[in-house]
Image (cartoon, rainbow, N blue to C red):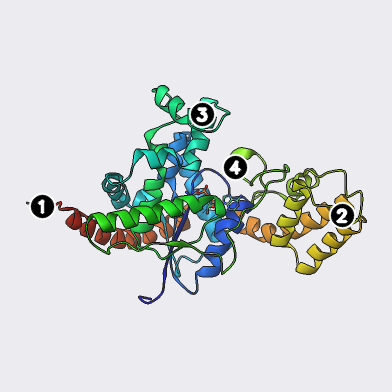
């Protein structure tokens, strides 16, 4: 076990998992679990940055856990834990923040995006920063949201992970993690932290598109296919996906909504199926109804078995509790060691 690369990743506890989470993250976790020293967690502290209903937070944690297990994560092969069960993370987050600049955090795309939405700003550029500073009491633009990348870096660095399987939208956070690690090392003249990288089995980072014609699939975009979607609901969503008027002449350029359907098909269908529809597009014989029907069919082949297992597992509190208690114990061991060593490097000593 010692010689294997360390893998670490997590998903926020903000609701059911969708195809973006699955192909950007969870499916990679499952494929990696036999070959690496893997740790996967549920990010409940990160979820607090957007103020979930306290009654729902624990339910959401349980749901993600059930979905991890249903997708095939094996608690005997991986350390599976809940972020808040490892208090060392919170302390290291405080320590690491001493080496993180407010300016670099304010320029992070995810922060700007959330702040923009919270303040109702539509423009880009320098005005956002002025608006944020001017708007002093909007708790939706909170310090937790600003320091989200610090907490994410700490999740990774506390395990000294080598590989972090995440989707394309998280690459900037990973870049910041490397920057914080380098900065800490150079400030304290040490080589303590490693610089982690994304992992995509040699391919590019994945960005799963939504069904609404533009952008990525995301919980707040309302364009998701969930692993737990019922068959009928799922078919309906796919059949309603945005398309265009169809190619007017052979070899026309592909519009974004159609390119998105092809991207989804590339994930769930066989290469032959995808090629069939691409050829049909190229010679103008394509019927979008057929494309969507096939796409729904192939998505269901992936999601329905997972859905069935989610339904079996999600009510089994005894089992779920056992998995994360065992995981927390093992995660805390590494985390405590890292924290002890970092405190020492920073000069914090006990009398
Ligand atoms: P979250 O919950 O937003 O996303 C979880 C994972 O799903 C991926 N993802 C996507 N991938 C491709 N296409 C999409 N449309 C799509 N939507 C979501 C995300 O890239 C991510 O891998 N900050 C992290 C949670 C986190 C974390 C960490 C991850 C906290 N600490 C430490 C790795 C290591 C996040 O955004 O989760």
Decide if residue 90 is in sight here. yes
Decide if residue 147 is in sight here. no
Q: Which label number is shown at residue 290?
A: 2
Q: Earlier in the sequence, mark 4 or mark 2?
A: 4
- Report which residue position mark 3 lands on: 118
Indicate the quadrant where residue 30 lies: bottom right
- Report which residue position mark 1 lands on: 350
Badge 2 density bin: few <14, some 14–19, many ≥20, Cα 10 Å: few
Q: Residue at x 51, y 33 (%)?
A: 125
227 and 255: which is toward the camera: 255
Is the C-beta of the residue carrying label 2 under 8 Å from the nearest atom of ligand 1?
Answer: no
**SS at mark 3?**
helix
Badge 4 density bin: few <14, some 14–19, many ≥20, Cα 10 Å: some
Q: Residue furthest left?
A: 351
Q: Which label number is shown at residue 219?
A: 4
Left or right: 23, with 89 as reference point:
right
Q: Nearer the viewer, mark 1 or mark 3?
A: 3
140 and 317: which is toward the camera: 140
Compared with 28, 53 (above or below) is above
Alpha-carbon span between mark 4 and mark 2: 27 Å
Q: Which label number is shown at residue 5?
A: none
Is the C-beta of the residue carrying label 3 under 8 Å from the nearest atom of ligand 1?
Answer: no
Q: Nearer the viewer, mark 3 or mark 4?
A: 3
Q: Earlier in the sequence, mark 4 or mark 1?
A: 4
Q: For the residues labelled 1 and 2, say whether their Cβ atoms are less than 8 Å apart.
A: no
Is the C-beta of the residue carrying label 4 under 8 Å from the nearest atom of ligand 1?
Answer: yes
Q: Earlier in the sequence, mark 2 or mark 3?
A: 3
């Amino acid at each position: 076990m010692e010689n294997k690369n360390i893998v670490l990743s997590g998903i926020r506890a903000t609701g059911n998992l969708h195809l973006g989470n699955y192909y950007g993250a969870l499916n990679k976790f499952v494929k990696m679990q036999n070959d690496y020293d893997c740790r996967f967690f549920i990010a409940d502290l990160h979820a607090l940055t957007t103020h979930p209903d306290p009654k729902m937070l624990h339910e959401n944690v349980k749901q993600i856990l059930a979905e991890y297990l249903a997708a095939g994560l094996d608690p005997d092969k991986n350390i599976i834990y809940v972020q808040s069960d490892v208090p060392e993370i919170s302390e290291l987050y405080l320590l690491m923040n001493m080496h993180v600049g407010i300016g670099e955090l304010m320029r992070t795309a995810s922060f700007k995006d959330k702040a923009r939405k919270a303040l109702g700003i539509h423009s880009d550029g320098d005005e956002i920063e002025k608006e944020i500073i001017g708007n002093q009491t909007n708790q939706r633009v909170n310090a937790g949201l600003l320091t989200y990348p610090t907490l994410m870096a700490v999740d990774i660095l506390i395990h000294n992970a080598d590989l972090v399987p995440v989707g394309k939208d998280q690459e900037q956070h990973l870049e910041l993690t490397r920057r914080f690690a380098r900065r800490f090392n150079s400030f304290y003249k040490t080589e303590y932290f490693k610089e982690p990288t994304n992992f995509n089995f040699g391919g590019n980072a994945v960005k799963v598109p939504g069904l609404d014609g533009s952008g990525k699939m995301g919980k707040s975009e309302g364009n998701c296919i969930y692993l737990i979607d019922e068959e009928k609901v799922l078919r309906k969503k796919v059949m309603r996906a945005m398309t265009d008027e169809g190619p007017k002449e052979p070899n026309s350029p592909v519009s974004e909504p159609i390119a998105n359907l092809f991207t989804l098909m590339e994930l769930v269908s066989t290469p032959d199926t995808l090629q069939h529809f691409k050829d049909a597009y190229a010679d103008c014989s394509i019927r979008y109804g057929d494309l969507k029907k096939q796409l729904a069919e192939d998505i269901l082949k992936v999601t329905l078995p997972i859905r069935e297992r989610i339904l079996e597992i999600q009510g089994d509190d005894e089992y779920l509790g056992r998995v994360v208690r065992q995981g927390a114990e093992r995660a805390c061991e590494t985390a405590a060691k890292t924290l002890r060593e970092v405190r020492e490097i920073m000069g914090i000593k006990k009398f």
